[in-house]
Image (cartoon, rainbow, N blue to C red):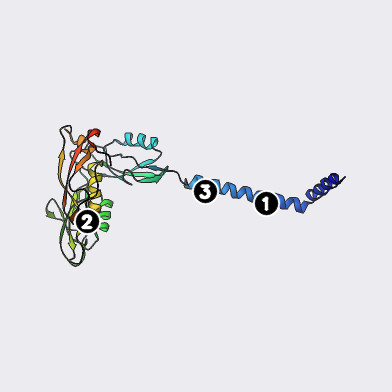
Amino acid sequence: MAKKDTAKTKKGILSNWIVRNLVLAVLMVIGLLLAAQLGMGLITRHNRTVAVPDFTNMTVAEAQQLARDSHVGVKVTDSVFIRRLGAGVVYRQAPKAGATVKKGRSIFLTINSIVPKKVVMPNLLGYSLSEARSELNNRGLALGKLNYIQDIATNNVLKQSVRGRTVRAGDLVISGSEVDLTLGLSNDERATTKVPRVIGLKYVRAVDALHDRYLNVGRVRFDSGIRTYADSVNAVVYRQDGLGTARTYGSPVNIYLTLDPEKIPAE
């Protein structure tokens, strides 16, 4: 008898339209919250990241295929002219190879054009090294040698040149040119930096890693298996000088490159 009374009571409560609507409203809110959480996860791809592959020296078609296999996208945003590099192949990318990005992220490519393209040289005087480097990348130019002289501010750009010739803001230079910078170095600064490990990196990435530590590439030696420019682009560093040692700003670091993966020592 008690069970029947309880069942009647529940039925009576649920038959009340106010209670019924409240229950439906609560269920609807819960459903919306779950849907929003699921949708946000899909939109932001939360905790779904991949390592950026290395697209350098690939054709655009090859880069697109590798991008699909790696769950990222590629977009050609600029071009440079490198005489010895194959026409239409990837010269530079952003973000760099090895960076961690969310799946579906677009990787921006700079390719080698068929004819020389000229760009307007920006005025880098007074910029910090990081600002100058960013501006050069935006203009399709590359950071070349870092030369340090005594000045009140460390890493402040004092002079800009291409192949030993001073270039002024507004001058036309070939896209992809390396721009050497003369930078200040204060006496108050401790002008030493540690040589990073660049073993296992391709040439362009090794240069970037050394510049990050205010160092230059010194002698570049290729082993006997490297015969063409394309080989040199794909080669990786298997040996370097001064790993982990302290060097003064602007010091050169010699690197040795190979195509033989067996020559590359483990970390």
Where residue 170 appears, as percent x and y from the top left, is 20, 57
Q: Amino acid at mark 1?
A: Val
- Residue underneath mark 1: 26
Quadrant of the image occupied by residue 134: bottom left
Where residue 140 appears, as percent x and y from the top left, is 25, 49
The answer to whether 201 is drawn above or below residue 210 in the figure is above
Q: Nearer the viewer, residue 266 or 230?
A: 266
Say which mark, if any, is on residue 193. 2
**In the rendered view of the protein, which quadrant contains the N terminus?**
top right
The answer to whether 57 is drawn above or below residue 44 in the figure is above
Quadrant of the image occupied by residue 52: top left
Judged from the image, the secondary structure of the residue bearing numbered disc 2 is strand
Residue 65 can be seen in this image: yes
Judged from the image, the secondary structure of the residue bearing numbered disc 1 is helix
Where residue 162 appears, as percent x and y from the top left, is 15, 52
**Point 76% across, 52% down: residue:** 19
Where residue 252 appears, as percent x and y from the top left, is 16, 50
Say which mark, if any, is on residue 91. none
Relative side of 18 to 140, left or right: right
Q: Amino acid at mark 3?
A: Met
Q: Earlier in the sequence, mark 3 or mark 2?
A: 3
- Residue underneath mark 3: 40
Q: Earlier in the sequence, mark 1 or mark 3?
A: 1
* C-alpha distance separating marks 1 and 2: 62 Å
* C-alpha distance separating marks 1 and 3: 21 Å
Judged from the image, the secondary structure of the residue bearing numbered disc 3 is helix
Q: Amino acid at mark 2?
A: Thr
**In the rendered view of the protein, which quadrant contains the C terminus?**
top left
Q: Residues within 10 Å of mark 3 (few under 14, many from 20)?
A: few
